[in-house]
Amino acid sequence: MDGYAGTATWPSTITGMGQVEKGQVENWLYIKKLNFVHFNNNIHRFADKKMEANAKKEEPQPPQPEQSHENKLFVGHCIDVLKTIQSGCIDVAITSPPYDDLRAYKGNYKLDLTELGKEVFRVLKDGGIYVMVIQDQTKNYGKSLTSFRTAISHCDVVGFKLFETCIYKKLGCEGAWWGRRFRVDHEYIHIFLKGAKPQYFDKTPIKIPSKHAGKSMTGCASRKTDGTTFKSKEVVINDTKCPGTIWDYANGGDKNPLKRKHPAVFPDKIPHDIIRVFCPEGGLVLDPMCGSGSTIVQAVKTGRKFIGIDIEAEYIEIVKERLRKECA
């Protein structure tokens, strides 16, 4: 009897049909009660575990990142598509995001730049670089400060370091007739770093000719923290030099009729230079809002792989056409 309990036994006085002591009956009934409670608790635990297992099965599972998106173009919201990309696979990300409603983009490009930054941070390799070309709207004689707020949030919230902010100086910029403020002939190139240091950095490809190459000069007496200077020395000026943080580029259209089908473009030379400086050969370049495809085309031309995303199928078709015509 009561095989499930395993501990309760009939008192020998009962099995032997002898006289039953009152205490023995009470003890026996107490043991039976304990075993019943123990069994009942086990039943409840089993039912709870089964319900918990069933609930887990019914919960919708998040999309699992695919193994590779290399050399593919995607139509969709950049954050949604980025969530399908495996972590730590991108070498360099380059984009110019929509900001301050300066362009309509068919009404589709509303997004949180900080949330985008979080996904870009996740998919970047340690030492990877995220480059953002951005400016600020001027309204009622004041700047929106979007470029600065974005830089701060990417460092304080997302986890990037600001490796450098370069200035894209627009050559041939219109607007000399402006009478109430300065002509805006620049944009910011925020260069964000994931990790301790860049995994790859070679500024040799973007060096520019030195005006006084081959000449000797006496100087280079850098100033110390206490205000004094090091001793001057004679040096020979190199043939080339680093361009510094002011990068001169012709305005964005590049005289390319395909690019001009997009409402906001930057020069192909920007991603061309950034890729060669920060991305190893054969590396993977991402543009989460690839627009007319400048980053994608330059990735292919420089021997790198690419991932391009845009919410507008029309713009992705522009990219495909540019790849056929310029990278065949």
Image (cartoon, rainbow, N blue to C red):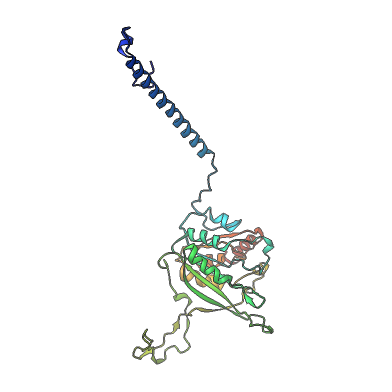
How far from the left and from the top, in percent, is residue 9?
33, 17
Q: Which of 113 and 13 is in front in this view?
A: 13
Which residue is rendered at x = 51% and y = 48% of the image?
Answer: 64
Which residue is rendered at x = 56% and y = 55% of the image?
Answer: 81
| Quadrant for the C terminus in the image | bottom right
Q: Is residue 39 above or below residue 258?
A: above
Q: In this view, does 212 lie above or below 41?
A: below
Q: Which of 92 and 298 is in front in this view?
A: 92
How far from the left and from the top, in percent, is residue 320?
61, 61
How far from the left and from the top, in percent, is residue 73?
58, 58
**In the shown orientation, is residue 177 left or right of residue 242?**
right
Q: In this view, does 56 lie above or below 15?
A: below
Q: In which quarter of the image is residue 312?
A: bottom right
Q: Nearer the viewer, residue 249 or 282?
A: 249
Q: Nearer the viewer, residue 307 or 198?
A: 198
Q: Is residue 141 above or below residue 123?
A: below
How far from the left and from the top, in percent, is residue 174?
66, 80
